[in-house]
Every structure is written in structure tokens, then in C-alpha cells.
Image (tube, rainbow, N blue to C red):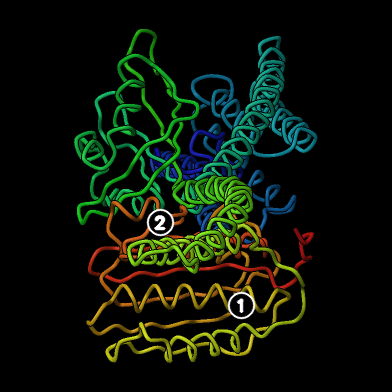
Amino acid sequence: MPASHRPGKTSFPDQRTLLTWLFGGRLVVALATLIAGALVWTSVPQLSFIASVAVILALVITGYGAWKLRNEAWEPGPAFLAAQFVVDLGLITLLARFLGPTGGAAPALYVLLIAAYAVIVPIGFGITMTIAASGVFAVDVIRYSGSDAALWAQVLVFNLVFAVVAILGHRLRAAGLEAHTLETELERVRLEADVSLRNIRSGVVTVDPHGRLAFMNPTAQQLLDIDGEAMLGEPVLDRLKNRSSELWAALVAGIRHGRKVSRGEGLVVHEEGRQFHIGLSTTTFQQQPNAASSVTAIFTDISDSKQLQELQLRAERLEAVAALSASLAHEIRNPLASIRSSVEQLARGRHAGEDEKVLAGLIVRESDRLSRLLSEFLDFSRVRATRAEPVDVHEVATAAVRLVEAHPDRKPGARLRVDGEPTIIEGDEDLLHRTLVNLLLNAVQAAGEGPVDVTVSVRAVRQGDLPTGLRIDRPVRLRVRDTGPGIPEEIRARMFEPFVSRRPGGTGLGLAIVQRAVAAHRGAVIVDSEPGAGTTFTIYLPATWVAEDVA
């Protein structure tokens, strides 16, 4: 952002500044009076003595005035200004005696005196001072030279000078005050804009027409992992290209062609491999016609929004698959039961040979296996929260851990524990128990014979702790974290889909049931996993909830 300049820098000088300049001019006049008095000391010693006393008095009053002006809280009053005027008028009158009142520089000194006080004091006060100065000048001239037309012409000039200077001074003072007010307001707006840009949750980057960094707020530095303060004024496009090719392309298009981006998306990749999606927009500013543009890009991390969109699509797909599974299971189950019954009867018949009995036994076993698979399909399609009652999620997690610890698939190297404190929500206890058991079994089964730590944590969180875009009333977070091998990349994108399993013999319905159970409680489940770094399933549930209609 451009550096701010001092407010009032171009404003009309204030009264204190003008008085300071007046004191400087007074010292010059006092010195001239003292020198003039010394030159005529032998011829008019009385006048020279009066001039010396007047100069000493003027210096004392000037020193007192300068001391008072050092106090910024003190404001010059009418008495102070009148005293300063009397001192200056006296000095100029004495100096005029030495120079000659009607010729030389004497009238010019009176004009300077009147012009100076015309811009220092209010107009009404200045009129009084002008009349006094004109009167002293006229009396002095008449006393020593008599009255003539030239005298009154000079008096008229004094008043005209005062009128012109006073009006111009008033207008300049008003313009200066307006400019000062405008600059103060501009500085305030600059400060507010700077504070806003530095505290908003969006990244802001400005690049000049030569590709040099003009501004980068702290959020942008954090999102891009770039030290913006150190790179101000330096070429930055190559660094931005390494971080986000889409952001780089939007900035280059703005610089070269003045093209703006309203709603764009991109991917930010850090050096350590971390990556996330951003939504971005750009605006351009052309300082001169037909010149390259400065470009400002505003971008936001939308990875949470992307994840929530995927959750919604996943839930919709699972609902469709559940409806299809229920329909197919009902259509297949009855014919399968008839086939099994018929085969059993044929195998028990008197004419059945040994081979027929072996084949019948094979058909019966496979029918039973298909029947169990159909039962799992029906269970998947019937995932519904049938009742809403107060449930201590911590107790449900503890019961699920105990059940999995006694499960045959749990190996000695698997250690399970529950963190958190009693947390009450409204929900279906059986469905929540089933959800946690599925997640815990997945964790211990994925670890195989190797050691693994599985932790279930339960706690209430604030709305601000939720992923961006997720709205849950009084949210409660369940987190199942393991130190196992993680989920392979090829499985991770599809792991909540039915029939996707990495375990031999698995139906791939466990995580699909988890997804539907959480959705039935109006919650959301999010997974984070890296190969070799373990897996974390995070479930957000509302503390208060109205059960859906029973299917």
C-alpha cells in the first residue's frame, strides 16, 4: 500500500505558525530601529534613547510570546494579540521617524503590518487594528509634514490592502481547513482499509505492471507460504507460479490484457506437498491509457467448502444406492428362499445320489451366503434414526471400545482408549453405537498384526471451530484417530461408496453405513488420512435434533 503522508502538509499555515513568522519579522524591524537610532544618536539622542527602550521592550514581549506559543494547549487571546500589535505598531512608527514618514520604506512597513495582522486575527479585530494603524500613520505624517492628497491616498491603500488580504486570507484559511479535514479523513480511511485488509480471512495480493509485489496481506502470506514483507518491490510472479498456476495466470492476464476474473478456482501447492483449493477473483487498475495494469487478486481457501460439497453428493448417492439395495434385496430374497427350500427337498429325496447331495449342499451354502449379503444390503438401506433421546456420547464411545476390544479381529498390538468428558446430545443410541463400532473395527482391522493406537475423543465445540460452510446447532465433535497405515490414495476418494473395501471378504458397506447414520443425525463426517501417517475420522453432530420419519 502507498505510504501515507502527514495530514495538513499542504494546508494554509495556522495562527501559531503565522505568529512565529511575525516574531521573526519583528526582530528584523527591531534590529533596523536600533541601528537607525545609533546612527542619529548625536543629533537626536532623545529619539535614539526611546528607540533603544522600545526595542528592549519589544524583545521582552517577543520572548514572552514565543514562550507562551510553546504550550500547545494554550490559545492566543485578544489581549495577547492586541499587545503584539501595539509593539509592532510602535516599532514601525519609530523606524518611520528615522526613515521619514511619507517617503522611503515607511508606508511599505505599515502595509506589511496591516497585511500580516489581516491573516492572523479575525476580520472584525483586524478592522480595528487597520483603523488604529491608519490613524497613527496619518497623525504622524500630519504632525511633521501636514495633510495632503498623497497622505489620504496612502491611508486608502492601507484599507484596501487590509480588505484584499483579509478576504484572501479567510478563503485560504477555509480552504486549508477543508484540505486538512479531507486529508485527515483520507488518512482515517487509509488506516481503516489497511486494518481491514490485514485482518480479513481472504488473501489479497497486488502486483504492479512490471510484476513486482506491491502489497500482500498476512492471510495471503500464510496461504501462499511467502514472506510478503521481504518481497515488497521485488518480482513475485515466478514465486506465485510455483505456488498456484491458476493465480499466476489470472495475474498475468490482468497485467497483459487487462482481463478480470470474477469467479475462478485454483490449487495452491506448498513446498512440503500440502495442497488445497482456492476461489479467486481479480481486478485491474490502469494508471495511464494503453499502459499495463496493476492487478489485485483476492482469494480464499475453499477446501472446506469443497469437502462439504463432496459430503452432500456422497449422501445423495448413498440414498440412491440404499433405495436400489432395498428394492433388489426384496426382489431376490423370496426367490432365493424358494430355490434353497427346493434344493433341500431334492437332496433329501430317495432318488438323490451322492453327487446330487454334494451339489445340493453347495447350493444351500451359497444361498445362505447370498442371504447374509442381502441382509447386509437391507441393513444398509434401513439406516434410520428411529428415536431421539438424550444420549451420553462418551458412554456410547466407551461401550463401543469395550465391544471392539473383545472382537476376534482385534490383535494384541491394538490399544484403544476414550478421551473427553460426558457429553449429552439428542440422538439414536443404537445407531451411534453402530457407527463408532464400524470405525473402530476398520482401524484395528487395517492395522493387521502391527501395533496401532486408536483414540476416540468426545467434546462440544463452538460454531467457529466447524469447517467453513458447515452450520450445526450446538455442535459436538466425535473424533476417531488411529496410528495405522493410513488409507491408500486409490481407496480414499471412494471409501464411503458401497461395495468398496480393501479387506478380503468385506462387503464395503461399513463406511457407507457410517455416512448414512451421521447424515440421519443431521451431521457430517470428514476424513483425513495420509499413507503411513494414520487416519482421522471427524464426526460433527448437533446437540439438539429432531428425528426424521421412520422409513
* Residue assigned mark 1: 460
Which sits in the foreground, 75 or 417?
A: 417
Q: Can you say which quadrant of the picture contains the C terminus?
A: bottom right
Who is closer to the viewer here, 15 or 250? Answer: 250
Residue 64 makes an appearance in the image = no
Percent position of residue 479, x then y: 48, 75
Q: Looking at the rendering, which quadrant does residue 434 occupy?
A: bottom right
Q: Residue at x 46, y 73 (%)?
A: 439
Secondary structure of the residue carrying tag 1 is: strand
Q: Residue 492: which quarter of the image?
A: bottom left
Considering depth in this image, is 227 or 410 the residue closer to the camera? 410
**Which amino acid, mark 1?**
Ala
Q: Amino acid at mark 2?
A: Met
Q: Disc 2 to disc 1, how far (Cα)?
A: 27 Å
Please report the residue visible at 64 percent of the width from the left and 21 percent of the height from the top.
145
Marker disc for residue 87: none
Q: Is residue 475 visible?
A: yes
Q: In the visual, does 222 lie left or right of 479?
A: left
Residue 187: name its quadrant: top right
Residue density around tag 2, few if under 14, some if 14–19, many if 20 or more, within 10 Å:
many
Task: From the image, tell me which residue sits under label 2.
Answer: 495
The residue lying toward the viewer, choosing from 468 and 290, is 468
Left or right of 77? Residue 356 is left
Task: Tell me residue 500's x, y (percent).
Answer: 39, 55
Mark 2 lies on a secondary structure that is loop
User: Is there a contact, CB below 8 Å, between mark 2 and mark 1?
Assistant: no
Where residue 517 sits in the image (x, y, percent)?
A: 60, 65
